[in-house]
Amino acid sequence: MRKTIILFVSALICFSCGFESDMESLSIGGDFISTRSTISVVDSFSVSLSTVLIDSLTTSGNSLLWAGKYTDKELGTISSTGFYEVGIPEKTDVLENDIYDSLLLVMNYSKVYYGDTSLLQSFQIYRLTEEVKGDENGNLWNHSSVAYNPNPIGRISFKPKPSSDRKVKVRLTDQIGRDFLAMIQEKDESISSFDYFRDYFKGIAIGPGSSSSVILSFLCDTSMNLELHTHRKGLEKEALIQKFPVGSKTTSFSHFDADRSGTPISQIVKQLIEIPSEQSNNKTYVQSGIGLLTRVDFPTMQQLMETDRKYVLLKAELILVPEPGTYKQVPLPSELVLYHTDKSNRVVSEIVGDQNATLAADLVIDKMYNENTKYTFDITDFINTEVSDSYFDTSHGLLIGETSSSIGASLNRVVFCDRKNSSYKPLVRLYFMHYNL
């Protein structure tokens, strides 16, 4: 047994230049058993990478709103506007003679951001003029938008501190605040329920101002409120706050835009278009929110069907290397997964492991030399399924992106390297056991 284990481990470090004739292998068994088996590792099958665009990604129903604009030297200028409906206070403490002070939009950072926070940033708040409505399933997408009055009801210029626990407070138009106070004081029907209030005040949009070099994310939860500040005269001045919370988490969403002019993938405008790595400086891209994914194809894998040798595929790995220097300012996402796709670049289904658990790539980051950073994907089940009918359909590729719960909820990005004949090229590595009865 010990001898067999040693031979197996030794075999796994052997790599070949071809599948049949040049395959390096070791024997298991020999004279003392009747079956002769060999274990081999092959990394000669070609891998093709391209960048594709997924037209629609759901951005509603998650806990973040994105707002701002920044320029990515790889992917152009990205901008985002966050939308949400405003609810009514759970309880109010207002008397007829209470005096209005201010109306504030109060938000908490999520501590995730993209761009340069060292510069002064400007953001603007708008009042929606249209009800927020999803599709037939209630979903809102990265390209969804809702009409709003172009005249801002609030502005702010500041240097963001997204890693802090500070709140962002934006003063809104006093007339709206005075109207809110009057409605509460008069017990107006418009503020008696969320549905009535939504008819009167349809919601808020948070977008970039004239100077913006960062996209910030804010928590769209109980910490996000419109705060109506008033005071009551008595023996002492009593300050009061009425909080208008997020009305519905299912209808809050973020709209994303991308200006890719001048980038290697400027021609990618719809889902059927693929930009091969050869046309994009030997790079492909993944960027959540915007909908960019990397497609992987295996054009020579049909050769597996052309061998007379009997084999068992023990393991298959796809190894992709991020382009050096592209993840210093934008950290690599810790979790990437694979999706089945077809010739139309549709996301068919996520590839999962045992008990339908997410099968995330193994990420290794070389912090010392920045030479061995890589993602390793387990594609054993994918390859075995594709060859099970003795035919490998080369139109069945794979898409690489973040998990289905994250792909529309961030702006994480990866730039994959596809420099052929280099240590940074993509690899598919197959581990075989061959046997002769």
Image (cartoon, rainbow, N blue to C red):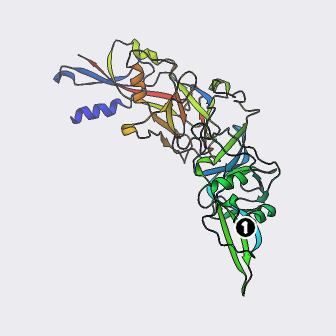
Is 32 situated above or below 302? below
Residue toward you, 46 or 405: 405
x, y percent for residue 172: 77, 61
Residue toward you, 152 or 351: 152
Splitting the image into 4 quarters, where does residue 104 fall?
bottom right
* In this picture, residue 27 sits left or right of residue 65: left
x, y percent for residue 397: 51, 24
Residue toward you, 43 or 156: 156
Residue toward you, 127 or 402: 127
Is 10 situated above or below 310? below
One can see residue 202 in this view: no
Splitting the image into 4 quarters, where does residue 26 fall?
top left
Is 265 situated above or below 126? above
What residue does disc 1 label? Answer: 186
* In this picture, residue 388 sits left or right of residue 284: left
Amino acid marked by disc 1? Glu
Going 61% across and 43% down the picture, which residue do you hit? 59
For label 1, the crowd category at 10 Å Cα-Cα, with few meaning under 14, some 14 to 19 and many 20 or more, is few
Going 22% across and 25% down the picture, which residue do you hit? 29
Splitting the image into 4 quarters, where does residue 154 fall?
bottom right
x, y percent for residue 134: 63, 41
x, y percent for residue 1: 20, 34
One can see residue 344 in this view: yes
Q: Secondary structure at mark 1?
A: loop
For the C terminus, give its image quadrant: top left
Query: Which residue extends farthest left?
Result: 32
Total marks in image = 1
